[in-house]
Amino acid sequence: MKILLLEDDKTLGKALKELLEQNGFETEWITELDDFSLFAKTRTYDLFIMDRAIKNKDSIYTLKELRKTISTPAIFLTVKSSLSDKLEGFEAQIDDYITKPFYKEELLARIKAIANRNMPKGILKVKNIEIDTQKHVVYVDSKPIENLTQKEFMLLEYLVRNKNKVVKTDNLIDYIWNEDGSIETLKSHIYSLRKKLSDKDLIKTIKGYGYKIDE
């Protein structure tokens, strides 16, 4: 997910950019309204995060202008907290409105909610991994993994569909191999998946029980 961030407070802007990138969001940080408008019109983003008060100007007018041609989801992150301020934002077709000060956990949760709402059908996502269930392609950092076997794809898809839950070993074997599978076969496929995804920590082993992928 690629984010265009508009924030003229240098300290907060730097902290927000670091927070977003630490959580897997590619982020370009802009401090000027004119630059923000130019970037929004000439580059492709999945989300705008905008402060409203930028050097004594209200970015709501920039958003209104952008909305004539661009439908990219947007969040206001601002000290302007009155009901009339919020209503103005939603009338300008903002997707969410967060007032400062804010909890970083709330900001991340709202970003993920917007991302999930706008995710194309047939796409599963966890961390830096996307699974296209219609084309049977797995992407890591937007790059396709070419050499996954059918069983590895099924295994990864099943774990991602049940993310944040521990999936029993027996359930995985029954789902993928029916009666032809074994614990050793499953372990071999888990090992291969970790290697191909270049992430040994994504699929967690829950000793004596099964496996788990966390959000």
Image (spheres, helix red, strand yellow):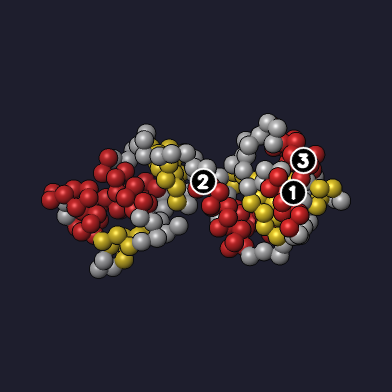
Residue assigned mark 3: 62
- Name the residue at 37% across, 34% down: 135
Under tag 2, what secondary structure?
helix
In this rendering, would 99 be left or right of 147? right
- The quarter of the picture where the C terminus appears is bottom left
Amino acid type at mark 2: Arg
Q: Disc 3 and disc 2: Cα gap in Å? A: 24 Å
Which one is nearer the viewer's eye here, 209 or 101? 101
Under tag 3, what secondary structure?
helix
Q: Disc 1 and disc 2: Cα gap in Å? A: 23 Å
Could you tell me residue 139's position as x and y percent?
A: 43, 41
Mark linked to residue 117? 2
Quarter residue 212 falls in: bottom left
Q: Residue furthest right?
A: 56
Pointer 2 local density, CA inside 10 Å: few below 14, some 14–19, many at least 20: few
Amino acid type at mark 3: Thr
Disc on the earlier residue, 1 or 3: 3
- Name the residue at 67% across, 43% down: 93
- Name the residue at 60% across, 47% down: 26
Could you tell me residue 119's position as x and y percent?
A: 49, 42
Pointer 1 local density, CA inside 10 Å: few below 14, some 14–19, many at least 20: few
Residue assigned mark 1: 88
Badges 1 and 2: C-beta atoms under 8 Å apart? no
Could you tell me residue 70's position as x and y percent?
A: 66, 34
Amino acid type at mark 1: Glu
